[in-house]
């Protein structure tokens, strides 16, 4: 791969990132809230809670948060009974134990027992704030298939895991704001979402839903795609908050994120194939999330700069832009990037650093400008300083988990192919 091509790739990636942040700037500055319709109330809601080996104290808090709002709730013990049955009974809920068969089967068994117009699917480690169920129900109308609240993390003793979880939640919130205004959110959160019972009951109890995709979870994403294809709106309301427990340690967090990205890649392809959300901004945001780590990895694999040649091109590039009357923001930002590159090059020469280290300095210079641009975005949204720190630490975490997920998908696909070949050989 030529130096010119690598140089052009840097320029392309810069433009992709700037475009992404401009989209956030345009659509993500204001929270997403739904108007109150008051057609339904909490009396029209049944809560379904599947449980499997959940922490007893956390499950107790979840049940309390639901029971205190006066709604009927059903707990499905997925191959487990005590102490969940006793806790459910104390708070007036219905408990059903089934053989261990996974969350999808538990949801299907639970929704069969729903007799109300609306059903809230709730994880066993997620607490609903007081009045949240009534608030969500009051915003439902006939055009909405599902509505999800704002999901936040419970504080834990593991500060690093809590920090990373907050990072992901922050970016999910920003992206949901964009997607809500451009075709509907990507996924109705599996931790807590409210649905029209008669719409999703046939699907959740169908073999299409119960037949788990090998190596993937994504039940919430599959329900969301189903509702979109049926023509229903899928929305978020930030007026209502729920609180969920983050993973216990970094290893659990990485496994969770890998599972999410595995399912994300699969359903991203499905959405493209099925043209579920015909909106260019929607697909640009999704593509940025899922494809950029792959493209950057390819670039890193082929990065090998001729320092002198690159310096000459950089200087020429900046001089050319002095008379550029194009988009001022993009032009000035790119020129500033190149100025930082020259500064980095001079540092390299002064320190007599190996040429092979140049790429590190280059990426560092680029990252500084990206962070500056992101800082402007955060400032315009009046975000707290603490949340800003979360954002700046998000990129390496998402990059690592995305690549881990992609590698695991490729590995599982390879293993499945080998197994099919071996079975075919044995059959013959």
Image: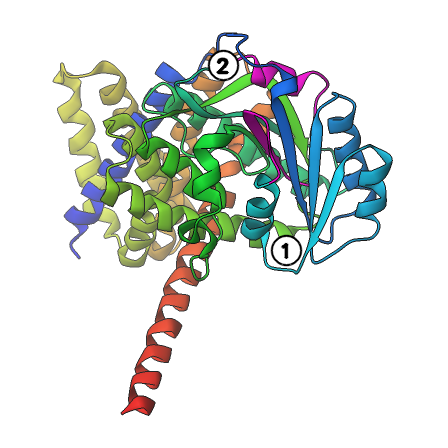
Q: Give coordinates of residue 418: x percent, y percent.
A: 34, 78
| SS of the residue under disc 2 | loop
Mark in the foreground, 2 or 1: 2
| SS of the residue under disc 1 | helix
Residue 251 is marked as: 1
Q: Earlier in the sequence, mark 2 or mark 1?
A: 2
Asked whether the viewer can see residue 118, the reply is yes
Q: Residue at x 51, y 31 (%)?
A: 197
Whether residue 138 is in magenta: the answer is yes
Work out which quarter of the rendered image holds the N terminus and state it. Answer: bottom left
Q: Which residues are magenta?
A: 113-139
In the rendered image, the vertical position of residue 141 relative to residue 6, given as above or below: above
Disc 2 target residue: 31
Total of numbered circles in the picture? Answer: 2
Circle 2 crowding by C-alpha within 10 Å: few under 14, some 14–19, many from 20: some
Q: Give coordinates of residue 428: x percent, y percent.
A: 27, 92
Q: Give coordinates of residue 131: x percent, y percent.
A: 69, 16
């Amino acid at each position: 791969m030529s130096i010119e091509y690598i140089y052009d790739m840097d320029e392309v990636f810069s433009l992709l990132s700037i475009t992404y942040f401009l989209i956030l700037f345009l659509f993500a500055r204001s929270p997403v809230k739904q108007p109150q319709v008051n057609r339904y109330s909490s009396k029209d809601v049944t809560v379904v809670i599947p449980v499997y080996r959940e922490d007893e104290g956390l499950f107790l808090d979840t049940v309390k948060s639901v029971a205190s709002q006066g709604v009927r709730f059903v707990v499905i013990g997925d191959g487990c009974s005590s102490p969940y049955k006793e806790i459910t009974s104390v708070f007036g809920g219905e408990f059903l134990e089934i053989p261990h068969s996974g969350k999808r089967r538990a949801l299907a068994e639970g929704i069969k027992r729903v007799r109300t117009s609306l059903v809230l699917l709730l994880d066993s480690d997620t607490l609903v704030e007081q009045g949240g169920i009534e608030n969500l129900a009051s915003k439902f109308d006939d055009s909405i298939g599902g509505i999800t609240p704002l999901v936040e993390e419970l504080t834990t003793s593991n500060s690093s895991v809590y920090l990373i979880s907050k990072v992901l939640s922050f970016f999910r919130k920003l992206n949901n704001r964009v997607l809500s205004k451009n075709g509907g959110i990507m996924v109705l959160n599996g931790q807590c979402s409210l649905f029209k019972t008669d719409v999703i009951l046939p699907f959740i109890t169908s073999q299409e839903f119960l037949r788990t995709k090998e190596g993937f979870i994504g039940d919430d994403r599959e329900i969301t795609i189903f509702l979109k294809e049926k023509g229903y709106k899928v929305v978020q309301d930030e007026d209502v908050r729920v609180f969920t427990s983050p993973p216990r340690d970094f290893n659990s967090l990485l496994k969770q994120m890998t599972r999410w990205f595995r399912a994300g890649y699969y359903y991203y392809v499905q959405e493209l194939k099925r043209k579920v959300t015909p909106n260019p901004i929607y697909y640009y945001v999704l593509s940025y999330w899922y494809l950029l780590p792959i493209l950057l990895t390819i670039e890193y694999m082929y990065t090998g700069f001729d320092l002198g040649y690159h310096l000459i091109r950089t200087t020429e590039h900046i001089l050319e832009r002095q008379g550029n009357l194009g988009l001022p923001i993009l032009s000035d930002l790119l020129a500033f990037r190149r100025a930082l590159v020259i500064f980095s090059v001079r540092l390299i020469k002064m320190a007599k650093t190996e040429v092979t280290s140049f790429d590190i300095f280059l990426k560092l210079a680029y990252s500084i400008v990206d962070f500056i641009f992101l800082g402007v975005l955060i400032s315009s949204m009046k975000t707290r300083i603490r949340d800003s720190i979360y954002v700046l630490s998000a990129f390496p975490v998402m990059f690592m988990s995305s690549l881990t997920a992609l590698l695991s998908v490729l590995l599982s696909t390879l293993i499945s192919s080998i197994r099919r070949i071996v079975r075919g050989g044995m059959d013959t």
